[in-house]
Image (spheres, rainbow, N blue to C red):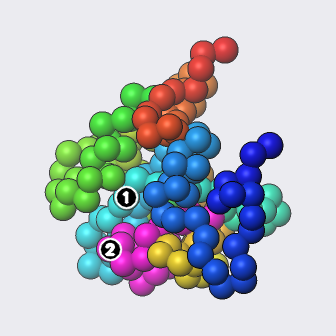
């Protein structure tokens, strides 16, 4: 195994790996693609593409998402205290790219719904499953916030969930789960 940075660990407080090198490293780890959504206190929908999602606990069911600090979606989530994680299927690449673009009218270009008591909008054509969450904790780490959400409801499109192939992102490109 070859260590980076000349094989030496940086001295405490010393220089470490730069952002570009770290981004390259993490691009080698494919991840599922989601769109995290919420509705602000005025009823306006917010959302952004996110591949930093992880299950934390089964009992109680908790997941985490990592969102860029300063993101309007994060700000709306924190004010509302709820959000939804839309798990995208392989045909949802256009939605993933749209919600990663920051376009202000992104919700005008996709079909979505938000039911009574939902954590956030459900992207009806692009998600094969959705986790609705209530924020339990948020922790700032560097330029992102780690948000822990207690899952209080899930939605699955029955006919789509059985055949859905998740959308993945890695090596700076989109792909789908291999047919098996």
Give the labeled residue for mark 1. 48
Q: Residue 72 carries which label?
A: 2
Question: Residue 154 location in percent, x, y?
Answer: 59, 52
Left or right relative to 80: residue 132: right
Residue drawn at x 70%, y 64% is 62
- The verdict on residue 168 being magenta is no
Near-viewer residue (161 or 12):
12
Spot the residue most to the front.
6
* Residue 80 seen in the figure: no
Please give the name of the residue rendered at 52% of the width and 49% of the height, measured from the top-left corner. Answer: 24
Q: State the quadrant of the C terminus.
A: top right
Span highlighted in magenta in the image: 64-82
Local SS, label 1: strand
The residue lying toward the viewer, choosing from 127 and 92, is 92
Q: What percent of the width, then of the height, locates residue 143? A: 47, 75
Q: Is mark 2 on a helix, strand or loop?
A: helix
């Amino acid at each position: 195994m070859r260590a980076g940075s000349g094989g030496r660990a940086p001295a405490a407080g010393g220089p470490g790996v730069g952002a570009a090198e770290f981004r390259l490293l993490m691009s080698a780890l494919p991840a599922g693609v989601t769109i995290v959504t919420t509705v602000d206190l005025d009823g306006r929908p917010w959302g952004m593409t996110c591949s930093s999602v992880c299950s934390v606990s089964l009992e109680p069911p908790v997941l985490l998402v990592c969102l860029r600090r300063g993101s309007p979606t994060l700000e709306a989530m924190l004010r509302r205290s709820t959000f939804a994680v839309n798990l995208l299927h392989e045909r949802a690449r256009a939605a993933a790219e749209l919600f990663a673009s920051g376009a202000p009218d992104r919700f005008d270009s996709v079909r979505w719904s938000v039911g009574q008591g939902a954590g956030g909008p459900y992207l009806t054509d692009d998600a094969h499953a959705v986790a609705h969450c209530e924020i339990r904790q948020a922790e700032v780490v560097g330029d992102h916030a780690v948000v822990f959400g207690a899952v209080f409801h899930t939605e699955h499109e029955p006919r789509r969930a059985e055949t859905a192939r998740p959308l993945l992102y890695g090596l700076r490109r989109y792909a789908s789960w291999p047919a098996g």
